[in-house]
Image (spheres, rainbow, N blue to C red):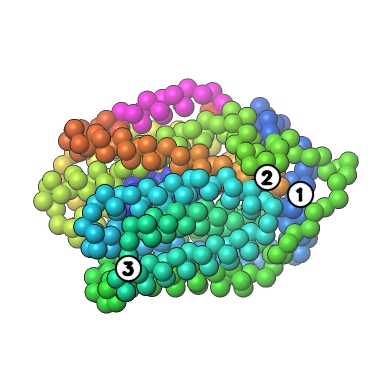
């Protein structure tokens, strides 16, 4: 679990924070609005989500407030930061607790696999739910469930009845909750932040993601090491973080609980993407730019899913202490924080050029990780690898999500996150097999070669090179 999360952060592409977009100019062949499955002009007001956006936009003053004074957004950001930190703490605490109680690495791996499976399977249903129900209420309910599940695990540790079936049920529930909150939060941010300030808001969100990645693992280890309440302290902390996230969602009153369905009319043509659960998949697959973008990111995620595990194996072979291994892996989070200010200058590049450049630059960096030169070398390479990732996360938002019809946006967000993470379990399994028969350095070089092939294939798609930022 710990290695999986760290690998995703180091690869820089996985998790709820990746679903953010950039698209071609209006009227071009690569434009979102011109792609199959998209809506005609004006249809972004069609459906419940469209009514939600219309209600919020109608209430906005002519003069935009600075983002720091947008209490709705800052409240949501605080709750999301608390939940992200709590989850990062739990990502360390769960495998430690399982190993302490059972002594079985296989059960720790099974827990991680169950959580990932729950997250992937719930992705598309979560998107459809977010398009049909209040995103605010989805966050409230999902956070209540995640808090209750985590509190149950804490109680099981304290009273000594922690079992594998309970852990698997908890893992699936936590994975489902992650999918639900991830999609709903993205819709909430778009409801409370004017479109002119979305890029700045998402750049601030990078601080939350990478700050949690940096602070969570050492905090989780320290809380688990307190040996209080049978090692349940980190789980109590995580449950409290979910409760805080729930409270902040309750406080966001500007978002209507049940957006009204607008009347259909000649000026509100229906979306051509369909109303089913697969509408988001069809919309992405029918557009060459979006299809190539999602494919490239999915390749990077699949290859990088086991990066943390391989890094740990490499460093342990060099007799590096566990504390220094943690420092080395933290280089990825520090790189993400340092990359947030680079979003604006890097977005001067065309979106396809930026995506190909950042993804291709990971190939030599992955190869350099195979060099056994100690923890500081590892930290430095991970730092450089993460510098361009915040700009890609925001690119996703500009390229895909902002151009999506509002009535389908939840399903498109869910489709993007599902497609980008679907290959991660296979990547983890393949890397495990490679590590069993090859050295960690040879495994890392093999993955770098696979990534190079994937980048070359996607770079051969002319639609990516011609893509433009939307007006």
Residue 421 in the image: above or below residue 251: above
Residue 301 visible in image: yes
Mark 1 highlights which residue? 47
Mark 3 highlights which residue? 161
418 or 125, which is in the foreground?
125
Which residue occupies 38% across, 67% down? 153
Inspect the magenta stretch and tell me whether residue 383 lies in it. no
Which residue occupies 51% across, 42% down? 418
33 or 84, which is in the foreground?
84
Residue 158 in the image: above or below residue 186: below
Of labels 1 and 3, earlier in sequence is: 1
On the image, the x and y values in percent for residue 147 come to 47, 68
Of labels 3 and 2, earlier in sequence is: 3
On the image, the x and y values in percent for residue 52 come to 73, 57
CA separation in Å, label 1 and label 2: 8 Å
On the image, the x and y values in percent for residue 379 come to 25, 50
Inspect the magenta stretch and tell me whether residue 454 lies in it. yes
Which residue occupies 67% across, 60% down? 134
Residue 245 in the image: above or below residue 274: below
Q: Which region is colored magenta?
A: 449-463
The reply to whether callout 1 and callout 3 are in contact (CB within 8 Å) is no
- Circle number at residue 310: none
Assign a secondary structure to mark 1.
loop
Mark 2 highlights which residue? 408
């Amino acid at each position: 679990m710990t290695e999986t999360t760290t690998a995703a952060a180091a690869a820089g592409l996985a998790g709820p924070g990746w679903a953010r977009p950039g698209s071609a100019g209006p009227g071009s062949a690569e434009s979102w609005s011109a792609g199959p499955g998209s809506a005609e002009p004006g249809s972004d007001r069609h459906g419940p989500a469209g009514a939600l956006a219309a209600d919020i936009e109608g209430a906005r003053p002519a003069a935009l407030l600075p983002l720091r004074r947008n209490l709705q957004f800052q409240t949501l950001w605080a709750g999301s930061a608390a939940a992200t930190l709590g989850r990062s703490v739990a990502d360390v605490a769960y495998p430690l607790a399982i190993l302490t109680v059972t002594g079985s690495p296989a059960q720790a791996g099974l827990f991680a696999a169950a959580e990932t499976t729950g997250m992937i399977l719930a992705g598309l249903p979560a998107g459809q739910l977010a398009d049909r129900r209040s995103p605010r209420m989805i966050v409230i309910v999902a956070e209540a469930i995640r808090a209750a599940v985590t509190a149950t695990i804490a109680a099981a540790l304290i009273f000594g009845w922690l079992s594998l079936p309970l852990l698997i049920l908890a893992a699936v529930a936590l994975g489902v909750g992650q999918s639900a909150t991830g999609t709903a939060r993205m819709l909430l941010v778009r409801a409370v932040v004017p479109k002119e300030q979305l890029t700045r808001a998402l750049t601030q969100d990078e601080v939350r993601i990478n700050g949690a990645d940096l602070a969570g693992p050492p905090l989780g280890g320290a809380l688990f090491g307190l040996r209080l309440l049978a090692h349940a302290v980190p789980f109590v902390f995580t449950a409290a973080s979910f409760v805080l996230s729930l409270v902040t969602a309750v406080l966001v009153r500007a978002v209507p609980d049940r957006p009204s369905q607008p009347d259909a009319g000649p000026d509100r043509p229906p979306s051509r993407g369909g109303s089913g659960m697969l509408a988001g998949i069809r919309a992405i697959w029918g557009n060459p730019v979006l299809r190539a973008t999602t494919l490239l990111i999915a390749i990077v995620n699949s290859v990088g899913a086991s990066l943390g595990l391989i890094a740990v194996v490499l460093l342990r072979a060099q007799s590096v202490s566990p504390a220094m291994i943690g420092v080395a892996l933290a280089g990825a989070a520090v790189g993400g924080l340092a990359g947030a200010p680079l979003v604006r200058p890097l977005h001067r590049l065309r979106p396809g050029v930026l995506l190909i450049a950042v993804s291709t630059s990971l190939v030599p960096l992955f190869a350099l990780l195979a060099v056994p030169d100690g923890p500081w070398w590892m930290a430095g390479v991970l730092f450089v690898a993460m510098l361009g990732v915040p700009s890609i996360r925001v690119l996703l938002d500009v390229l895909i999500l902002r151009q999506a019809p509002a009535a389908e946006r939840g399903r498109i967000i869910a489709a993007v996150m599902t497609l980008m993470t679907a290959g991660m379990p296979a990547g983890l399994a393949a890397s495990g097999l490679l590590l069993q028969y090859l050295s960690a350095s040879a495994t890392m070089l093999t993955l770098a070669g696979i990534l190079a092939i994937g980048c070359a294939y996607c770079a051969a798609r002319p639609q990516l090179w011609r893509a433009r930022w939307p007006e």
